[in-house]
Image (cartoon, rainbow, N blue to C red):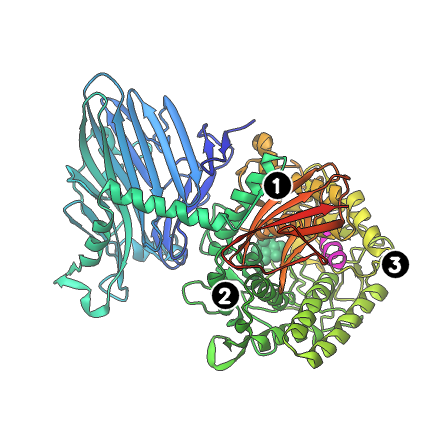
Amino acid sequence: MEYGYFDDENREYVITNPKTPYPWINYLGNEDFFSLTSNTGGGYTFYKDAKFRRLTRYRYNNIPADNGGKYFYIKDGDTIWSPGWKPVKTELDHYECRHGMSYTKFKGSKNGIEAEVLQFIPLGFWGEIQKVSLKNSSSDKKKIKLFSFIEWCLWNAEDDMTNFQRNFSTGEVEVKDSVIYHKTEFKERRNHYAFYSVNSPITGYDTDRETFVGLYNGLDAPDAVFEGQSRNSIAHGWSPIASHYLEIELKPGEDKEFIFMLGYVEVEKDKKWESKSIINKQPAHDMISSYDTADKVNRAFEDLRAYWDNLLGKISIESADPRLDRMVNIWNQYQCMVTFNMSRSASFFESGIGRGMGFRDSNQDLIGFVHQIPERARERIYDIASTQFEDGSCYHQYQPLTKKGNAAVGGNFNDDPLWLILSTTAYIKETGDFSLLDEMVPFDNDSSRAKSHFEHLKASFYHVVHNLGPHKLPLIGRADWNDCLNLNCFSEDPNESFQTTENQKGGTAESLMIAGLFVVYGKEYVKLCIRIGKEDEAKEAQVHVDAMIEAVKQHGWDGDWYLRAYDYFGNKVGSSENEEGKIFIESQGWCTMAEIGKEEGMVEKSLNAVKKYLDCDYGIVLNYPAFTKYYIEYGEISTYPAGYKENGGIFCHNNPWIMIGETMLGRGDQAYDYYTKIAPSFLEELSELHKVEPYVYCQMIAGKEAHRPGEAKNSWLSGTASWNFYAITQYILGIRAEYDGLAINPCIPASWDGFKMKRVFRDVTYNINVKNPEHISKGIKQILVNGQPVNSNIVPILEKGKEHSVEVLMG
Ligand code: GLC
Ligand code: GLC
């Protein structure tokens, strides 16, 4: 069953039934100021950091789901309704929610009133605009009442939902004209406040939640709205809100527009007050006046559209399947931007208070984003590398507001450092900007301990070399990419976290996944060293890479697939000898991408085993058979019920590793088959089972051993977006940025006649036309650039600012 449809022309997903199987959300904002908006108006807003600077309140795990957001109520006679259906849930004559590129548009109509609410955050602006358009399409004159509603969060989202003994006494607001100001804690250490305005006189307002809603009502039935009258309440403590009340007359056919703005202001310390206890409102007035007419708002909306035209214009394809085109051209790239911005912090599965930016997460996010805004990618790489230590290890996470390593989450995840080589080389290949390597980057955010970025890469590489175990394979530390494979943890206490509990001493558990990762990015490191003239370093590094390849062949091969690990006691993990968890996806992915033992047939055997044991209707599961009891020596992985999460779930993040592995063997049909199993646009018809948004990837789909295989969770924020984009564009479609040009090496389904890609690379536009008359999967007979043959599959960097044709003949 479907709950909407793709409108590719407008780059929107249009939800036509508000009762989606789970709230289907969108993100507004592109740099500092963000909102999450569900298809019924639920969600919240924050500045930079969803934990420390949250503007509006949201209750996770609420009943009913997704209750709380930015709402409008329309009272038309005795009928009360909301344009986004919630919170009132009056059945609408028409409902539509259009999630687009950084905006959401609701259209609701009832009894001859058509309401449209457009929400977006103008570029570079610290405020959300809600443009409300109301039209009377009936033949009678209408007198309606409009109420807005938001609920303020007392800034620190964690404190806000725990520390009630204090919070119920701190809330403070001001109301002046049509603007409601939230100034809790402004008089002490905060130099910021928020406001909610409308560009029209109001008849009334409320700022005290209890007065507006009533202590025992839900948001579906606030007293003030049902009585049709605001109470002009001023909050003193308890829960401050902001609600405007407008009386609106509409003649038949008439329409009116109102601009609401939810803004955030920072004021210099000595300019905080206008007079005693009265805040300085000038900065808010300036913001309000920049978008106080529909014209100004429309222009900002056009700018936003142009911004996305430009971003999405850098890679676009034409294939025979619109589902593929809309993933590559629109939604996958869009999600890459969102994950770049959010890392794993705020979604409808991430509460915004648990996690900041992940070291490994954000590095991986970059590979799907770097072509969009390379300057921001560069800055991000710098921020990430600054949380590293001299020995190459790093904090597992850092807070976006402070950019400092988060000590509470700790470190010692031994895969972490290597991802820095991935992001850095991806950035340089995209931009040709080698100067990043010379940039002085602090260790542990201490600028007195800065060294060149290249030294950070070197430290990353040698962190593995310096942490090898008894089989000369990498020590795993707390865990590798799989956070839940905690081989040194031995936790017996349900109150401790697997991620931060002190590891048992003397651990020699080793990871085959890190081994493969090391070979892939070790080779990259060597290549980079050669490219920048560090021949000696390249030679030395190559020795370590070769040694790792040998170690994997000797100690990491189980006969038909690569082992996953050696545990604390030196026992095999992911071996046919194990009773459960005989085979794991991660080491198959990384060791096949690294092509370890390819000549000996290991790559092929490994991928055949993946197909045989891990593949299922909904994707490739993480391990098989799933664990059915708790193994103290394996940790969190065996805590999950079979088929879910890291225990036999389909982790969409690691499926592309196998797709890429398949392309190493030239098996384009298999690679693409895996791609279509998890690509959301291909799952639209399954929405009822799948539950989450059909326009973005989720982290996990329940695996074949789960109670409900195919049911997905944790949409939006995971490394899935970037890895799938990377796999489809660079390995399946096979167009890849290299230091000296654009490499072309598709590996596609044999049935395809070809495809086209427009790629803007280093300010050069390449119109690539791949033809596949012989219906093969891989192999190139000829490449013509502007009609001239080139004798390598790397198309050089051509004249900037111009369009060039690249004709590729497979064969
Ligand atoms: C989550 C984490 C990521 C981890 C993965 C597998 O997505 O954000 O860091 O690699 O789970 O455990
Ligand atoms: C990863 C896993 C998740 C786990 C978390 C922290 O994100 O996906 O299952 O709970 O790490 O332990």
| Rendering coords of residue 294 (x, y %) | 25, 40
Mark 2 or mark 1: whose residue is earlier in sequence: 2
| Rendering coords of residue 711 (x, y %) | 61, 37
Q: Residues within 10 Å of mark 1 (few under 14, many from 20)?
A: many
Query: Which span is picked out in magenta?
Result: 585-593
577 part of magenta stretch: no
Is 647 or 437 nearer to us in this picture? Answer: 437
Three-letter residue code for mark 2: Arg
Three-letter residue code for mark 1: Ala
**Is label 2 or label 1 in front?**
2
Q: Residues within 10 Å of mark 3 (few under 14, many from 20)?
A: few
Q: Is residue 455 above or below residue 417?
A: below
Which residue was labeled with disc 2? 378
Circle 3 SS class:
loop
Spatial CA distance of label 2 from label 3 is 40 Å
Spatial CA distance of label 1 from label 3 is 33 Å
Mark 2 or mark 3: whose residue is earlier in sequence: 2
Is 452 or 347 nearer to us in this picture? Answer: 452
Three-letter residue code for mark 3: Glu
Spatial CA distance of label 2 from label 1 is 28 Å
Horizontal side, residue 342 vs residue 249: left or right: right
What label does residue 600 carry, if any? 3
Q: Quadrant for ligand 1?
A: bottom right
What label does residue 679 carry, if any? 1
Q: Residues within 10 Å of mark 2 (few under 14, many from 20)?
A: some
| Rendering coords of residue 334 (x, y %) | 50, 47
